[in-house]
Amino acid sequence: MESPLDHTTARALLDWQIELGATDAICDAPVDRYTLADKPKPKPRLAEPAQVSGAPKVDAVAEAKALATAAGDLAGLQAAMGRFEHCELKRGARNLVFSDGNPAARVMIIGEAPGREEDQQGKPFVGRAGQLLNKMLAAIDMGRAHEFSAQSVYITNVLPWRPPQNRDPKPEEIAMLVPFIQRHVELVAPDLIVLMGNISCQAALGKRGITRLRGQWAEAYGKPCLPMFHPAYLLRTPHAKREAWADLLDLQARLRGST
Ligand code: URA
């Protein structure tokens, strides 16, 4: 029988893994990947049609479009995303994070991607950034829990799966998930959309540069969109809250029909 590790050694090994970037325990027993080296590796799934000679071509974007278009309601869309197998982020995530809030809301907020807490709870914006988002919305008398559609919001993300170590999504990952967001917007049919941060702007507008884009109304998914600083950025950069406040007031004015 293997001798159990003493506390100090176990602690040192854990610290070492955290130092290397591990954030979650994925399974109960360790896996020695070197002994698996000879096993055939799964073929990479590509966003664009694969160019590997002889291999069947996978057009992940076309498949996402077909699944998304066939979804007749939000539950169907969530199920369709659960069946989509071409995004490798899915394999490292605990949960598919679909949405929160009131589907009848006039405002739809599109964030970037789930973080650790969101992945664990299966709900968007429940960590520190989410708490700040709740406060920002409360400041203009809105919130995800409001029963009245005029004051409530509906919240989702570009990516339904947490990227490993919260890395930025790759362009092909964004591209294959856009059909699902497009359909999500069609099904919720909000009056206005808030694009939270650069990834959300990249998916909707095809460009980044939130410092320039924020506060400038644009159109995407067939709706007026307001790009705003992401609450996670505001936590790191508190002086930018002034601009975020101006954007919230602008959103409120637009909802009241005065701009
Ligand atoms: N940041 C996001 O963009 N979305 C979340 O759900 C959480 C943090």
Image (cartoon, grey):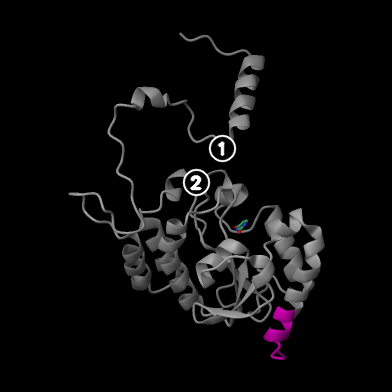
In the image, residue 251 lies in the stretch drawn in magenta: yes
- Where residue 45 sits: x, y (%)? 33, 50
Residue drawn at x 58%, y 28% is: 17
Instruction: Using the image as rendered, state which of residue 136 and residue 196 is in the foreground.
Output: 196
| Numbered disc total | 2
| Cα distance between the residues tagged 2 and 1 | 10 Å
Amino acid type shown at disc 2:
Arg
- Does the Cβ of the disc 1 residue fall within 8 Å of ligand 1? no
Residue corresponding to mark 2: 94
Asked if the stretch drawn in magenta spans residue 156, the answer is no
User: Element type at marker 2?
Assistant: loop
Q: Is residue 198 above or below residue 182?
A: above
Can you tell which quarter of the image residue 212 is in?
Answer: bottom right
Q: Which residue is mark 1?
A: 24
Which of these two is toward me, 145 or 158?
158
Quarter of the rendering occupied by the N terminus = top left
Asked if marks 2 and 1 touch (Cβ < 8 Å), the reply is yes
Q: Is residue 63 visible?
A: yes
- Front residue of 5/146: it is 5
Task: Give percent across and percent down for residue 31.
Answer: 43, 26
Place of residue 32 in the rendered image (x, y in percent of width and height, measured from the top left): 42, 24
**Type of amino acid under label 1:** Asp
Residue 119 lies, with reference to residue 159, above or below; the image says above
Specify the segment rendered in magenta: 250-259
Q: Position of residue 249 (x, y in %)?
A: 76, 78
Secondary structure of the magenta portion, mostly? helix
Residue 69, picture quadrant = bottom left
Q: Residues within 10 Å of mark 2 (few under 14, many from 20)?
A: some
Q: Quadrant of ligand 1?
A: bottom right
Residue located 63% across and 65% down the image: 209
Q: In the rendered view, would you say 29 is above or below 204?
A: above
